[in-house]
Image (cartoon, rainbow, N blue to C red):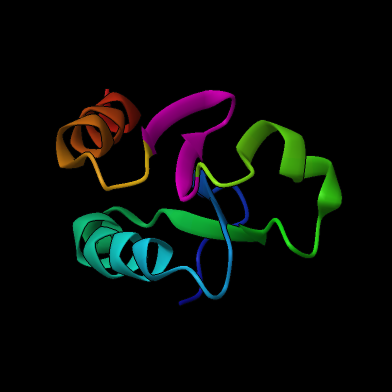
Amino acid sequence: MNLPPNAPALTLYLRRWCHLCDDLLEQLTPLIAPHDVEVREIDIDEHPEFEAPYGEHIPVLCAGERELCRHRLDPQAVQAYLLELRA
């Protein structure tokens, strides 16, 4: 998907082998598709600086510094964020 350079972004802290991470991303994708939101995936196995804050508490979905959900998708939190973007 080609998004504008200033498109809003979510950050998903994950591990590639994590089935909860796969589930969250699979559920998140259709939810954000109409909103031109980029998802930046950060594999904490490749970025040890994120081991301390996230460790086994993944996946974690953030909008900037704001944590939207942890372990499982919280559709209401994501939808609230998407509504804020339109305001």
Taking 42 as reference, is 73 left or right? left
Taking 67 as reference, is 85 left or right? left
Identify which residue is drawn at 22% across, 39% down: 74
Q: Which secondary structure is most common in the magenta stretch?
A: strand
How many numbered dots are placed on residues in this image?
0
Image quarter hosting the C terminus: top left
Write the start and end of the magenta stretch as one range: 58-69
Quarter location, residue 30: bottom left
Taking 64 as reference, is 81 left or right? left
Identify which residue is drawn at 46% across, 50% down: 59
Identify which residue is drawn at 36% across, 61% down: 20
Quarter location, residue 75: top left
Of residues 41 and 22, the one drawn nearer to the viewer in this rendering? 22
Identify which residue is drawn at 28% across, 70% down: 26
Residue farthest along the front direction in this orientation: 56
Residue 13 in percent (x, y) is at: 57, 51
Of residues 29 and 25, the one drawn nearer to the viewer in this rendering? 25
Residue 10 in percent (x, y) is at: 49, 46
The correct choice, above or below, for 56 with respect to 52 in the image is below
The correct choice, above or below, for 10 with respect to 76 in the image is below
Residue 69 in percent (x, y) is at: 35, 35
Residue 41 in percent (x, y) is at: 59, 61
68 magenta-colored = yes
